[in-house]
Each structure stands twice: as C-alpha cells, then as structure tokens.
Amino acid sequence: DYQLSDRVNSIQPSPTLAVTQKANELKQQGHDVIGLGVGEPDFDTPQFIKDAAIKAINEGHTKYTAVDGIAELKQAVIAKFKRDNQLDYQADEIIVSAGGKHSIFNLLSAWLNPGDDVIIPAPYWVSYPDMTKLVGANPIIVSAGIDQRFKITAEQLRKAITPKTRLMFINSPSNPSGTAYTAEELSALAEVLRDYPNVLIATDDMYEHILWPGKAFANLAMVAPDLKDRIVILSGVSKAYAMTGWRIGYAAGPKTIIAAMKKIQSQSTSNPASISQYAAAAALDGDQSCIDTMITEFKKRHDYLVDALNAIDGIECVAGDGTFYAFAHIDVLMQKAGVSTDVELCEKLLTEAKVALVPGSAFGADGYCRLSFATSMDVLQQAIKRISEFAASQH
Ligand code: PLP
C-alpha cells in the first residue's frame, strides 16, 4: 500500500471529467450517448492564430522564454486590458501561465497559508474549492440559487467575511450558471469589500468575451478603481479563441503578488510553451471578429436550449448572459423520478435517456444540472427530445 500525501487525499478528481469518462465508457460499449458535459468550444482555433504558431516554429521560437512570458505577449495582454477594460497595467503586473487554471493555482500558492479562509460563491467553477484545499486553505461557500440568478448579494458577502478571510473569488460570466454580474451588482460588492482591506479579490474573467450582444462586461477593477491594488484579474485565451489545448492563461495584479506567482512558476513549470505564447499574442492582437462568429452561434443554441428546457415539466432554466452553459433547476424532476440527489438523476439520464450532463452538486449546487451547448444544434435537439421523453415517462 502506498501512503499518499494528505494534500492529495484532501481533493477530488475533476467531476466534469468523470462524467465525460463515464459517457465514453458507455459509448465504447456501443451505446449512442449524447454528451453535454464538455467545457470547451466546439469550434476550431482560428487560422490566423495557427499560422502565428507555425511561423513561431519556423523562426525557431522553440526555446525557453522568460518565465513569466515573452514581451510580445505581455504587451498584447496590456493592450487588451486597455482596449477592453480601460485598465492600465505595466509589464511587471502581468504573468503568463500554462492556462487559466495554472494562473489561479499560482495565485493561491503565492497568497494563502494553511487555515486561511477563501470565499467561493456557489455555483462555482469546480476547481476553486479543490485548489483552495490543495494549498491548505478552507473554502467558505456562499450559495446563490436560481431566484438570485446565481449571484450573491452584498449582504451575503458581508456575513461570510471573517478575520480569517484572505481571498474572495468572483467569476462572471459564470461557469456553470452562464449569468454575469452587472456593474451595479459589482459596485454593491465593492462597497462591502472596502470595509475589509485584508481580503484580496480574484476575478476570473475567463468568459469575458462570451457575452450576448447588448450585454456590457464589467469586473470589480473596472467598477471600483480604488480597489485595484487588491484585485488580481485571471483570464486566458482558452475559451474566447477556442484555444483550450494551447494552454495559455494570464493574470494581472499588484506587482508584489505577480512577482510571487512568478517565483512559484519559476520553481515548478517555468515558462508556458513558447509556440503557444506566440499564438496567444496573435489572438489578442488580431482581428477580434472571430469571437463574434462564435457568439452568434452560441446565442442561437442558448435561446433554443433555454426555451426547450423550460417547456419540459419539472425543469426550470433562466436565460444566461453568456458562456456556453445552461444551468437548469431539476428538483421537481428529481421528485418525479423518485431520486433524492441530482447525481442520481444525472445517472438515470445517462443510463436511461443516454444523455450525459454534469450534476449541479459538482458545482456546489444540489438540485441543478449543467448542460453545455458547445455542440451542434442538431445534437442539442436530439438531447432535448431524449430528456423530454425521459421526463414524460416519470411520475
Ligand atoms: N476559469 C473558469 C471559470 C473556467 O471555466 C476554466 C475552464 O474550464 C478556467 C478558468 C481554466 O481555463 P484553462 O483551460 O485556460 O486552464
């Protein structure tokens, strides 16, 4: 028997990957399973980005780079923050890492001590609590249900803060809920955070660009410039440019924290892949209309899916503001199906209806499930047909 570390024993493997695995097993056994579990765009990386990578290879950019990223990419990140967010950063306030997840992990490693508390609004992105535990800190979950469009209020935040609170996560637009905080809602949170100068704010803006036309993106640094020296913005190219496999994320924040993140990166992974960095610089500096093409398609699917889910007896779903996820309330369907947890319902849906969804409890919200619409309209229609038939056959 191997005695593994307490650290690794304190965490769970990613539940979204577990669903995909179970669906794949059924597929291998010959079952026709529809997977709505995936967390990545179904589009290919735009050609001009691939071309930049090929050029980087041909020009010999295949060696170590600066630990925190090549100058060209950092400049592209700085220009992005200026262009999209009217925020000014210097090169020593930016770090590039091997994916958004890596940026987050570096931040937690650089900022938290064992025993520190981290506020995580639920439903949350699956990795926040486990990454928090990996560095020995405690996730403090603050829940917001469908009646709040999955967004926590200022009062909830105030109640959750204790002298041990050292970090708060905010993710908007949100994976899994698809909803985004308005500037006003963020201002109300900022009002609370002003009273607690020891709390650092990690704003995960990974889905910033996957927002429906007419919706304005805001983050805490934009609405509360006075708090900028307590905010770390976490983002990356994975979702907006369909670049999940390239592994480039970035963070912007106070230079002392960024330098600490760089120190950790220097003793763990070193620089992210040189070729991917050139591709990411091209993505950020290039023609942004590639994003619009994806959004038009995602919005069409979103509108279809939300309406179709609401038409099913026992399912309730609010319209999102962006992302490629719908988060449906299924507690009535759970009762009809005679199960007491969303995990059991999702298992039934997988084995009986052959549709793979991720149970809400994976995101800290029992009674819900997440459906990804990063798949064709055709597949979505088939999935809805199966879920409707399943729901109609329960009593
Ligand atoms: N943050 C959120 C909210 C995400 O959904 C994801 C990916 O699923 C990430 C961060 C990490 O992205 P990356 O693939 O760049 O590590």
Image (cartoon, rainbow, N blue to C red):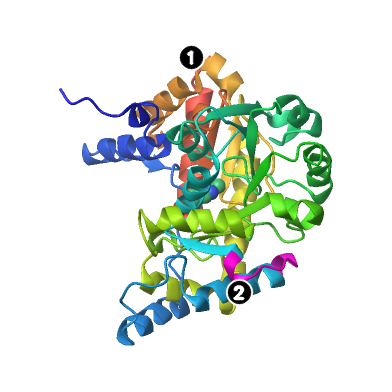
Quarter residue 170 falls in: top right
Which residues, given as a range, are shown in magenta? 84-92
Front residue of this view, candidates 123 and 136:
136
Q: Which residue is mark 1?
A: 339
Secondary structure under tag 2 reads: loop
Farthest residue toward the bottom? 59
Q: Which mark is residue 288?
A: 2
**Marks 1,2: beta carbons within 8 A:** no
Residue at the location (27% across, 35% down)?
Answer: 26
The reply to whether the residue tagged 1 has its Cβ within 8 angstroms of ligand 1 is: no
Q: Residue 215's image quarter?
A: bottom right
Callout 1: SS: loop
Taking the image as shown, residue 27 lies to the left or right of residue 252, namely left
Q: Any atom of ligand 1 within 8 Å of the CB at mark 2?
A: no
Q: How busy is the neighbourhood of tag 1: few (under 14 within 10 Å), some, or many (20 plus)? A: some
The quarter of the image holding the N terminus is top left
> Which of 9 and 80 lies nearest the eye of the viewer?
9
